[in-house]
Structure formats: C-alpha cells, structure tokens
Image: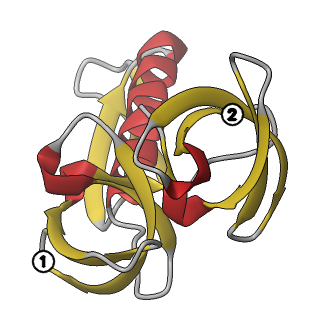
C-alpha cells in the first residue's frame, strides 16, 4: 500500500507499507532513491525469510547430518518451531535446526560425492543423469556408476 502525503515543510513525501514474511514495514521517503534502496533491502530480506520458513512435511531437502560439513538428501517428516525432523534417504532420522537444512538442489552437472558401490569409500564426481532418487555419476577418475541419493552427499 502506498499513500502520497505532503510533509509539514511542504515537501512531497510518501508512506509505503510492505509485508515481508508476515512482518509489516513502513517506509517514508522524500525521493525515489531511498525507496528503491529500501525495497531492494526488503526484497532480499523477504527472500531469506521465505526460504527459511518454507519447509513443510514431505519436502525433499538437504540436511547437514550431525552438524557436519556434508549435506545429505532427505525428506522433512515434521516441523516444530526452529526444529525440523528429517528422514534421510539412507533411512537415518535426525532433528535439525533450520540453519542446517536447505532445499534439495541437485541437478545434472552438480558436483557431489558418492559412496562408490556402497563399499564405504567416498569419491567426488558430477551427476550425469537424475530421476527422483536414482542418479548416474561420473567420478573424477573417469569411473561411472548408477546409484541412488542414499549413497551421495554434497559440500
């Protein structure tokens, strides 16, 4: 909502109310530059708030297992406040803080690491095909494998 007003000194001014992530911000300005900067800052804030609040049961996500350095794929089982229960694709289950969960974003060309033939050794490679939990990877040494997301992770 925007409302044009005249200030006590006779200057043209405007008030804008913007809702971002359930919060309402009121911006008053005398010139266009301030509003552009303010709206840009609110757009950035809104993007970060909405991505931080977007998880619901059933979402496919990446979680930092045991707060480690790697992101493992899983599905949100439930959300309670800042805690998200994730069931990883390999069957493990963990309660995570929102900061250790992000949307699943693997695609063809993504750099990941997979547990080669499920033998316990992790190697880096690139996704060459992807369909749900099934993927093909070409490892940095040239080996290729068809596997599932349950055997893969990313940094």
In which quarter of the view is residue 140 placed? top right
**Picture layout, residue 124 above or below residue 133:** above
Question: Which residue is under mark 1?
Answer: 81
Is disc 1 surrounded by few (<14), some (14 to 19) or many (20+) residues within 10 Å?
few
Residue drawn where x is 34% and y is 61% of the image: 21
Tell me what residue is drawn at x 37 percent, y 80 percent: 91
Q: Quadrant of residue 81?
A: bottom left
In the rendered view of the protein, which quadrant contains the C terminus? top left
- Please give left or right for residue 103 compared with residue 134 in the image: left
Which numbered marker is on residue 110?
2
Residue 132 point in image, percent of width and height: 74, 70
N-term mark: 1 or 2:
1
The residue depicted at 49 percent of the width and 86 percent of the height is 58
Q: Is residue 14 visible?
A: no
Q: Under tag 2, what secondary structure?
A: loop
Q: Position of residue 84 (x, y in %)?
A: 22, 74
Q: CA distance from mark 1 to mark 2?
A: 31 Å
């Amino acid at each position: 909502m925007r409302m044009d007003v005249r200030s006590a000194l006779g200057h043209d001014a405007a008030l804008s109310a913007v809702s971002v992530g359930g919060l309402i911000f009121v911006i008053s300005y005398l010139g266009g530059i301030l509003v552009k900067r303010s709206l840009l800052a609110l757009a950035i804030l809104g993007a970060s708030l909405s991505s931080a609040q977007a998880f619901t049961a059933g979402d496919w996500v990446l979680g930092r297992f045991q707060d480690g350095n790697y992101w493992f794929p899983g599905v949100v089982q439930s959300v309670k406040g800042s805690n998200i229960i994730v069931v990883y694709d390999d069957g493990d289950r963990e309660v995570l803080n929102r900061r250790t969960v992000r949307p699943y974003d693997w695609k063809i060309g993504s750099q990941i690491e997979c547990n080669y033939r499920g033998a316990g050794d992790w190697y880096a490679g690139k996704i060459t095909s992807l369909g749900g939990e099934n993927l093909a990877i070409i490892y940095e040494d040239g080996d290729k494998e068809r596997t599932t997301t349950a055997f893969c992770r990313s940094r």
